[in-house]
Image: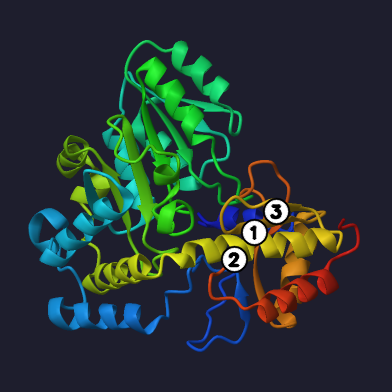
Amino acid sequence: MPFAPFDWIDDEARRRAAAGLVRTLRPRPAEAELLDLASNDYLGLTRHPEVTAAAADAARRWGAGATGSRLVTGSTALHAELERALADFCGFEAALVLSSGYAANLAALTALTGHGSLIVSDAGNHASIVDGCRLSRAATAVVPHADPDAVRKALQAHDGRALAVSDSVFSVDGDAAPLAELATVCRAEGAALLVDDAHGLGVLGEGGRGALAAAGLAGGEGVVATLTLSKSLGSQGGAVLGPARVIDHLVNTARTFIFDTGLAPAAAGSALGALRLLRREPERAARAREVAGDLYGRLTAAGLTAVRPDAAVVSVRAPSAEAAVRWAADCRTAGLAVGCFRPPSVPDGISRLRLTARADLSREQIATAVATIVASAPSGVS
């Protein structure tokens, strides 16, 4: 037989095509051609002149790259300033900046668990949490979505070190986790609580300080947060926030921190610029929530099935994966960019359009977006 080690890839591609699950890259131009309800730029800061100027200033002063891992040459005074600013803004003792939110979740989960420990993970958690659980070598119990009692039962069945992990706002439907109840369960069972606040920072809490601040849990001894700088802050990178001894432990043990090149100075600078702007304009957080509520109200009034948003994500149900892809493509043709979530990105197998509210959207833009979505809806949508 001829040597053809990758023929299996063709078989996989045919199966994806038959299931309507083919994914493609669409490089976008520098200047926006579409009304954007697909990105995670919740506060409209990624192109804000103050934020881009902070990125440019940081690149000019510190260079284009961090030049090495954080423990070698990749830590700058700028990184330390960002860590202090994030911890202060979100209400935690200390913070550690990494190259992405994905890396932050892997760092926290692998460094805070291990052989003999238990991770209790919500069924709706982001893929980075799922991968962190797999890499941790800990036993993992996946429990039903947003079910503190299931978390309690899983913790009670384990004797030893344990950690419960949940998104604060789930990226598929935009619903919020019952953080106060989860924290109560964890305290009662002696477990740590790790919360990915990627979709809460900048949107929830006073002035956008995040879901943990909103729930009164920020800075708690048994509470650790991860977040990304690439959504509300319009930059790139991630961070872990928590007690100082937890952050020190990650510096010494987290492989995605130790062996990864540090965050580029431009990204650190722009995130700092965005934080300063958000402190000065805290009303942006409430505006993002207001836009999400407006989108939801208009869509449901038009007869579409949407999930009531707890933050800035609005999910609209589609009848099938193929219909979701066609719906999103028709919206794009009409000048509107929307997200399209299909299996395996959706844990319940239900395909959706995923809309992201932005604080800088006008009422006219909201009305245009809703009209486009309704007019493009495939048959079978209700």
Image point (57%, 40%), residue name: 124
Q: What's under tag 3, amino acid-wise?
A: Arg
- Residue bearing mark 2: 357
- Which SS class for mark 1? helix
Q: Are marks 1 and 3 in contact (CB under 8 Å)?
A: yes
- Pointer 1 or 2: first along the chain: 1
Residue occupying image coordinates x 16% and y 66%: 78
User: Badge 1 is on which residue?
Assistant: 13
Seen in the picture, residue 295 relative to 227 is either above or below; the reply is below
| Residue 360 in picture, x, y percent from top left | 54, 75
Q: Residue extending furthest left?
A: 72
Q: Quadrant of residue 260?
A: bottom left
The CA distance from mark 1 to mark 3 is 5 Å
Label 3 SS = helix
Answer few, some or many: residues within 10 Å of disc 2's Cα (few below 14, many 20 plus, some between 14 and 19).
many
CB within 8 Å, label 1 to label 2: no
Q: CA distance from mark 1 to mark 2?
A: 33 Å
Disc 2 to disc 3, C-alpha distance = 34 Å
Q: Nearer the viewer, residue 145 or 92?
A: 92
Amino acid at dot 1: Ala
- Residue in view at x 82 percent, y 69 percent: 374
Whether residue 356 is visible here, answered yes or no, is: no
Image-based side of 343 in relation to 66, left or right: right
Disc 3 designates what residue?
15
Image quadrant in which you'd find residue 134 = top left
Residue 188 drawn at (x, y percent): 40, 16
